[in-house]
Image: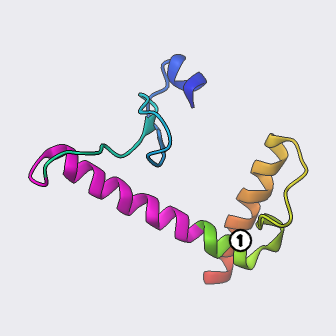
Amino acid sequence: MEFHYNRGERRTCLIGDAGYPLEPWLMTPLAHYPEWSRQYQYTLKLCKARNIVERFFGVLKAIWRCLSSQRVLMYAPNIAVQIVNACAILHNMRLH
């Protein structure tokens, strides 16, 4: 993402937890703001979005065992991305 951001592509960003630093291309929670502030509202919405994504990852890992932590994908990153995308597509096909 940083590479793409530095090339001027700013249509997407990543969502991270508090363990990551705030970057222009990485959205992280903002701590210690009063409840009435816009920063607090941002953090609430960000955490809600992260929760949805993490639940979806849990569903994918439960259905497609090749994605679980016990079965680490031993492939180059570009192949691993294709495997994860294929699992997501198959999951959507199952739902429909």
SS label for mark 1:
helix
- Front residue of 28 and 13: 28
Magenta residue span: 35-56
Where is residue 72 drawn, in percent x and y?
Answer: 85, 58
Identify whether 7 is placed above or below 57: above
Residue most toward the top? 7
86 displayed left or right of 23: right
Which residue is at 41% across, 33% downward?
A: 22
Q: Is residue 54 magenta?
A: yes
Q: Which residue is mark 1?
A: 61
Q: Let me know if residue 2 appears in the view.
A: yes
24 displayed left or right of 79: left
Which residue is at 84% across, 47% downward?
A: 79
Q: Quadrant of residue 91?
A: bottom right
Residue most toward the right? 74
Where is residue 63 drawn, in percent x and y?
Answer: 73, 79
Q: Tell me the quadrant of the picture where the C terminus can be found.
A: bottom right
**Magenta part mainly helix, strand or loop?**
helix
